[in-house]
């Protein structure tokens, strides 16, 4: 969304943004369908959504549940439920926060990291099977542009949420 007072985007830029928006919707639908399938076949007794928590703990390292909730754009009660399941299955552990002994950090266990590696390899294999006919340079370009788009989306998220909230109250 353009800043207030800014000139409207040129027609070509608007058309490109509109096409991108349509493709993001298509992509989101496909990902949601795959995620629904994965959710229905929970592995290792852990619901699929809890794996997002595990992935972030492996990638970012130990952290408090409040920081984890913010990182995965979730509420603390959901994080608490998901981490309890991961702890129960030995994939995550609670440990004292080195900065504040009264607080607790969550950290992936060796078993959690091993499962992460296994699931990442499976995911990468599935994506590779979709891209088998693609030129490697095109795959690299797509990865770069998706990273750039996602980074900008994360950066603009607070403003976008305010805009959406104002639309709901209007």
Image: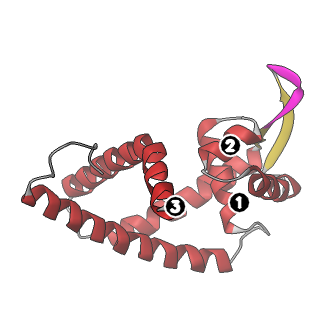
Mark 3 vs mark 1: in front = 3
User: Which residue, given by chain and number where applicable, does mark 2 sit on?
Assistant: 68
User: Which residue, given by chain and number where applicable, does mark 3 sit on?
Assistant: 169
Q: Nearer the viewer, residue 143 or 163?
A: 163
What label sits on residue 148 in the rendered view? none
**Name of the residue lying farthest toward the top:** 99
Q: CA distance from mark 3 to mark 1?
A: 33 Å
The 10 Å Cα crowd at callout 1, few under 14, some 14 to 19, many 20 or more, is some
Q: Nearer the viewer, residue 78 or 127?
A: 78
Q: Is residue 131 visible?
A: no
**How far from the left and from the top, in percent, is residue 10?**
9, 54
Give the mark nearer the N terminus: 1 vs 2.
1
Residue at 52% over, 58% down:
121
Region of the chain picked out in magenta, as a range: 99-105
Q: Nearer the viewer, residue 96 or 7?
A: 7
The 10 Å Cα crowd at callout 2, few under 14, some 14 to 19, many 20 or more, is many
Residue at 76% over, 42% down:
65
Q: Is residue 7 visible?
A: yes
**How far from the left and from the top, in percent, is residue 75?**
71, 53
Q: CA distance from mark 1 to mark 2?
A: 12 Å
Give the mark nearer the N terminus: 2 vs 3.
2
User: Which residue, given by chain and number where applicable, does mark 1 sit on?
Assistant: 50
């Amino acid at each position: 969304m353009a800043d207030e007072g800014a000139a409207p985007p040129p027609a070509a830029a608007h058309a490109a943004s509109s096409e991108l928006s349509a493709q993001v919707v298509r992509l989101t639908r496909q990902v949601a369908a795959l995620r629904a399938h994965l959710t229905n076949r929970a592995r290792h007794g852990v619901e699929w959504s809890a794996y997002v928590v595990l992935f972030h703990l492996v990638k970012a390292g130990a952290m408090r549940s409040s920081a984890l909730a913010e990182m995965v754009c979730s509420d603390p009660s959901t994080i608490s439920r998901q981490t309890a399941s991961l702890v129960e299955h030995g994939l995550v552990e609670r440990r004292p926060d080195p900065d504040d002994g009264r607080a607790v950090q969550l950290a992936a266990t060796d078993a959690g990291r091993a499962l992460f590696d296994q699931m990442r390899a499976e995911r990468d294999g599935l994506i590779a099977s979709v891209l088998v006919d693609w030129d490697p340079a095109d795959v690299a370009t797509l990865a770069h542009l998706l990273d750039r788009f996602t980074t900008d989306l994360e950066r603009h998220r607070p403003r976008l949420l305010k805009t959406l909230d104002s639309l709901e109250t209007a």
